[in-house]
Image: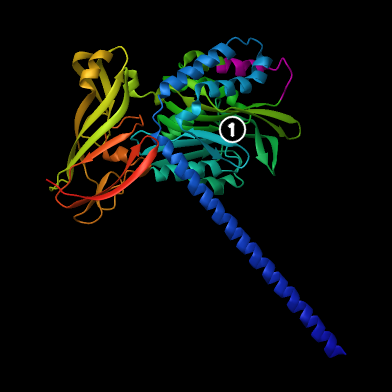
Amino acid sequence: MPSLLKKSTRNKVQRYLKCLLVFLFFMASYKFYTVYLEDLREESADEDDLQTVFLSENKVQVYKKWLNCAKWNLLVIEDPVQFWTQFTRVTKKCDEEAEIDKLGLITLKNKDEDKIGILPRNNDEKHTFITLGIGRDITGEQRWKRKMEKLGKTVEFYGADPMTEINEELYPQIGKYFPFAVSRTPGYATASVLKNRQYINQSVVHVDIMYFVDKLLKINKIDNLWMDAEGAEYDMFEIFMKNGSFAQNGIDVCQINIEVHLSETGPNHLNYERFMKFVKQLIREEQFAIFKTEEVIHMRISNSWRMLLPIILLISTVSLAEAGKFTPNKYELELTPEFFGDNSFTGKTKIHVDVTGSVEEFDLQVSKDLEKDGDKIHVTLPAPITKASITMKGFIEIAYKGKAGKKGANKGLFLTNDNDYVTDLKNGNAIHLFPILEDVAVPLALFIITPRRAVVEMELMNGSNLMGEHRNVEGN
């Protein structure tokens, strides 16, 4: 009998272990499968987002439509409480009227909210990203980093949050972490911080934002600023003004995602007035447009309303061609590699343009890789160009010179070994190959003159579709 009981117990243990192993195998397989599906979704999203750099919509017209809508619908509201309650509805209406999706807005999901951005189409390879208020979450930053790397660009991340728990291990995965709060006034003051999954008021060190950007980071351009200051954002509104401290110190901000908090909801609360004054000044100065706003209620110890405001800088994304009354509609590019000791190449660019008014001079944005002082060429025309005269000429033609990259450079025209040159026009790489391209995405007509029996592999933009072509080309 004892032997029989022992055997029965052993069988039960074996069955239990088998069930446990099957369960663990199932869970491991499920986790692997979900991770695999998530990777596929992310890869698909990246491909869609990267195509936004080819959008050819006139950005200035979109901004003007949005600002005009905002002026007519927001500047007329005088009551601060009504302004707050109507703000999200009105801005969404303006988003639709201006068709802002034509700008190529992409969504960057964090764990509890979405951030909005526009992938850059300029020649700058290095970009600066600042997170004020990390909140134990860098999912959105990681997504931006991955997409930018696929465009051949690097991003320098700087994050500040007074709560070191988790943040001090998390943010260094992508950039440099600073264990303090950033505000408009330095000192030791109370701030709303996330601790043990709850927001509490706690005294923390505050560093002035001007000192943080100018003295600690030593930068004069912020490509992306994500701000979740838990109420301290009101004091920092002035940095975004035309005559604010950023402008006075030569600091440019291109794209901003900011959370505006309202923890007290009485009609006489000062923050209603401060928010209305801030937004109206932004609209009047016409430097910023505010896209894709959301209103969210967080349940904490008491209700807390917050407004998510992705703000896109207007003047930084206005193309130089548009400022000069030129609107490019097609580029024709001709490239001639010179296979000599300096690995140089020359090229000609025909820019087909539409013209408004009369143009006598304009600026062309060029790559900093060219041997020129600065990155702009000012062109004075021998005679004015008008809409009537451009129908006869049809285009502007520009010659330029570049240098092929070293072996394995993976940008522009580069060597794969000691003899073979390769280029890849996907994911915005054409900007490295053709340095005359401005921050205007238009269809490309590409002509390449090659040595005898060279192989050319290229992908050309045809409207909204990519056409792949791989063929042998007999050189001259």
Q: Position of residue 250 (x, y in %)?
A: 39, 23
SS majority, magenta: helix
Tell me: residue 137, above or below residue 89.
Answer: below
Residue at 55% in and 51% down: 38
Q: Is residue 400 left or right of residue 263?
A: left
Between 467 and 73, the residue placed more toward the observer is 467
Query: Is 415 in the magenta?
Result: no
Amino acid type, label 1? Asp
Q: Position of residue 251 (x, y in %)?
A: 42, 26
Residue at 72% in and 74% down: 17
**Which quadrant does the N terminus fall into?**
bottom right
Return the residue at label 1: 228
> In the image as oriented, which residue stretches furthest toward the right?
1
Q: Position of residue 97 (x, y in %)?
A: 53, 21
Query: Is 274 in the magenta?
Result: yes
Residue 333 falls in image quadrant: top left
Q: In this picture, which residue range is highlighted in magenta?
A: 264-279
Residue at 50% in and 14% down: 68
Can residue 175 be seen? no
- Counting every numbered tag in the picture gives 1
Tell me: residue 362, above or below residue 256.
Answer: above
